Amino acid sequence: MTATPTLTATALDLDTLATVTGRVAIFATPDGKLDTGARRINRLTKGAVERLTASDAFEKLTEGAAVDLAWPAGMAAEAVQVVKLSRRGRGAEFTVATRAAGAAIGKAAGTGAVLIVAPQQTGLADVVLGCALRSYAYTAMKSEPETEIGAITVALTDPSTLDLDAVQALVDGVYFTRDLVNAPANVLTTESFAAQLQDLSALAVEVEVLDEAQMAELGMNCLLAVGHGSESPSKTVVMQWKGGADDAAPLALIGKGVVFDTGGISLKPAAGMEAMTMDMGGAGTVAGAMKTIASRKAPANVVALVGLVENMPDGRAQRPGDIVTSMKGDTVEVINTDAEGRLVLCDVMWYAAERFKPAAMVDLATLTGAIIVALGHDNAGVFSNDDDFCGAFLKAADAEGEGAWRMPLGTGYAKLLKSDKADVKNVGGRAAGSATAAEFLHRFVPEGLPWIHLDIAGVAQPAAEPALAPKGASGWGVLALDRLVRDRYEQG
């Protein structure tokens, strides 16, 4: 796993600021007010900080943005970074601003060390989180990979008020998701993916791996059909975190784990196919969320299941026109083998519901290009059969600054999946592609079970650099799912 920055909180010593090497970050309010640490640095630099905060350049900065004073006179630091941020605030807007401030610090620091001087700043946990998340770099496949990232040290009045263990758990989960999603398909195979998930047992997560024979016995024929054309064996990995009461039904998280998607016999165009290494983004997000939940020893019961397959064209690959029988017993006419994610999810969802009788279920998948057409790369599509449960997730996503937008379900969309030969088709045509995909999955949700489907095709690996990450895998969803668990499922 990519090394995470070392996070440290220390008591501010004003007398040592002149000798600090590397980078130093300080805060100034939008109207230019400085705290005690920033005022000391202003004196050391002969008023340079005040001249900066009085400038037009500072006035034009948005909250959370920053500007550097390079090689400041009177200090050993290579740069003093002045971050524009209100000293106090509340709600999602302030969370976004504080994390943006941290991201500005982390992006500038790169792999170097940084001292964040913040004796009076609130929201410091979010500043540190933003800094650590933006410091991420996927270098595992470089000939000379980075082996560690520089330290993030926060100097404040009372270090005991800053819970860095909680921040570290979030960073660990997001880094894990990003590493999985960024990894190429010749490295992240179904087998190596399962092995990495088994390593979560070190955090007291109970992990079991179902092989193809076990899945065939269970009747998971839709999932197995997707992987028929691949040399990599299909697997379902079950991860249980038992932090709550023995009799408390768990929250179930389900992830689509297509480690590479050629489209199968319904072959995708060559242009852009290399991006299909990220088609296991749902499973990657579920894995990262479980790592965070277990790392912080959440007092809740959570079970996560991921279906791991590779969709390849081969003499054994499923064909358009094939009819397969799901674990539920519904027959599915495969119109397009590139609509494979829903075939993976339907069996895993039914298995999770049957075995664990969860309190609620969330599935995540890079499922449709149609959701990108609808929502771009700023929001995941949220489909749900339960207003209360959906509202809780949307509230959690908003609190964490992770874009999510509710989309419609309905019998009109379900009718588009009607098959003349089987119970249902796996696609419903070009119109409303995300909604028909969600309605397909809806068939595999038992009556009365609160359920959310998250189509994360646009947010798992955005086309442009996201706010808290370099270009590549974003880790979207880890923070929101962890918040959902904290807000709704923790006990005591």
Image: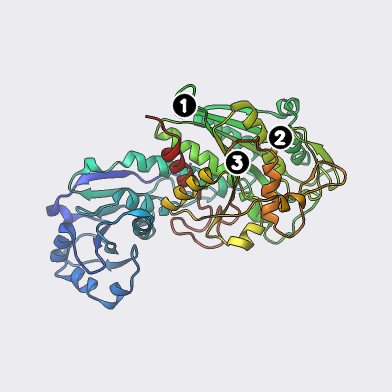
Q: Position of residue 192 (x, y in %)?
A: 61, 36
Seen from the viewer's position, the closer of residues 342 and 183 is 342
Q: Amino acid at mark 2?
A: Pro
Q: Which residue position is annotated with label 2?
A: 233
**Quadrant of the rendering where the C terminus is positioned:** top left
Q: Which numbered disc, 3 or 1, marks the residue closer to the eye?
A: 3
- Mark 1 lies on a secondary structure that is loop
Residue 207 visible in the displayed image: yes
Numbered badge on residue 255: 3
Residue 175 visible in the displayed image: no
Q: Which residue position is annotated with label 1?
A: 204
Q: Are marks 2 and 1 in contact (CB under 8 Å)?
A: no
Q: Amino acid at mark 1?
A: Ala
Distance from the alpha carbon under mark 2 to that under mark 3: 17 Å
Q: To which quarter of the image does residue 166 belong?
A: top left
214 left or right of 28 in image: right
- Mark 3 lies on a secondary structure that is strand
Q: Amino acid at mark 3?
A: Gly
Q: Which numbered disc, 2 or 1, marks the residue closer to the eye?
A: 1
Distance from the alpha carbon under mark 2 to that under mark 1: 26 Å
Q: Position of residue 481 (x, y in %)?
A: 48, 43
Q: Is residue 357 above or below residue 76?
A: above
Query: Could you tell which of marks 2 and 3 lies nearer the N-terminus?
Result: 2
- What crowding class fits label 3: few (fewer than 14 Cα within 10 Å), some (14-19), or many (20 or more)? many
